[in-house]
Amino acid sequence: MKPGPFDYAAPTSLREALRLLSDTERDVKVLAGGQSLIPMLNMRLARPELVVDITRVAELGRMSVDADGALHIGAAVRQAAVAADPAVRGGWPLLAAAIEQIGHPQIRNRGTVCGSLVHHDPAAELPAVAVALDARFTVTGPGGTRTVPSEDFFLSTFAADVEPDELLTEVVFPAPAPGTGWSFLELVQRRGDFAGVGVAVLVRRSDEVVGEARIVFCGVGSTPVRTPEAEQALVGRAFNSVTVEAAVLAVRGAVDPPGDVHASAQWRREGAEVLLRRALKQAWESCA
Ligand SMILES: Cc1cc2nc3c(=O)[nH]c(=O)nc-3n(C[C@H](O)[C@H](O)[C@H](O)COP(=O)(O)OP(=O)(O)OC[C@H]3O[C@@H](n4cnc5c(N)ncnc54)[C@H](O)[C@@H]3O)c2cc1C
């Protein structure tokens, strides 16, 4: 299939990109990696009059670690570049591991981290990882720049807190506390598929008990699903099969996944429990 006609602009400055997006007379769409937008254009699920390609805006192509140790990823930074970066692999291994489970190398070579977050497919890996890592989103528009915490950014299926005249200019991942263990696991029908169900787990060991835990699922709701009940079942307790089963039981009560053409609700519910058991063990064992 072929897309409907549209105008194309490739600005080289953020200011120009924002000016193009502020055209309220036309339906304008941002193009980042194009790995979701181009299929939508081809299937005519999106019919913008103007496509604004942001990949030539140099200031959006940067990735850095700031003085507080937080990782900044600009809107045009590709998923593959993030996953391959030594600083990311050392400091945010959960992020690198989750990216490696996105689609195939060709997709990750073009797709951007920010594009995946704005697109917000509920089965996508990165929104759950962003919530697990307590990311902050920098959104820039005609009114200036605002910062959105991860718990407010994902609104519902394919909807995030970015207006049509705004850009997600960067996502910021604070440094996990030293000694934090991690795991990202997903169940897929075929390698490279979106997660049928997935889980991001962070666990911090404090002496012989769990000091902190963060558990976030993808594929089980219209937004990433954090399960504080399961986290509380672990915190302050020794890590053993009894506490793990208490967390699994808490997830059973908290997660109510949908069924669809890809998987039944029961497959997702049982999958969430199986993944959580495995991910908690991996995360605990990886605590430094
Ligand atoms: C075969 C295939 C398999 C895939 N498998 C997976 C998978 O397993 N897991 C997964 O998570 N994803 C998967 N994807 C999607 C992939 O991760 C996309 O790269 C991602 O969803 C969108 O990122 P992008 O940079 O390509 O964005 P684009 O496709 O360019 O844009 C997506 C949407 O976000 C908007 N947008 C993009 N960036 C910004 C921004 N900075 N500010 C405001 N709006 C913006 C666009 O206007 C558009 O509406 C797959 C894609 C394909 C084609």
Image (tube, grey):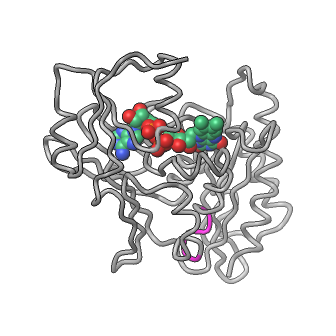
Front residue (pair 244, 114): 114
Above/below status of 70 relative to 276: below
Which residue corresponds to the image point at 28% horizontal and 47% vertical from the top-left? Answer: 139
- Foreground: 285 or 58? 58
Residue 265 is left or right of residue 131, and the answer is: right
Is residue 111 placed above or below 210 in the rendered structure?
Answer: above
- What type of secondary structure mainly makes up the magenta span? helix
**Residue 18 drawn in magenta:** no
Q: Residue at x 65, y 67 (%)?
A: 203
Residue extending farthest right: 241
Q: Is residue 251 left or right of residue 114?
A: right
Q: Is residue 91 magenta?
A: yes
The quadrant where residue 263 appears: top right
Q: Position of residue 114 (x, y in %)?
A: 43, 49
Residue at 35% over, 55% down: 170
Which of the image's four quarters has the N terminus?
top right
Is residue 262 visible from the viewing direction of this image? Answer: yes
Q: Quadrant of residue 251?
A: top right
Image quadrant holding the C terminus, namely bottom right
Residue 217 found in image quarter = top right
Q: Position of residue 24 (x, y in %)?
A: 17, 24
Give percent across and percent down for residue 241: 86, 62
Q: Residue at x 77, y 46 (%)?
A: 249
Residue in the foreground of this view, choosing between 119 and 278? 119
For residue 251, side relative to residue 26 (left or right)? right
In the image, the segment drawn in magenta is 90-94
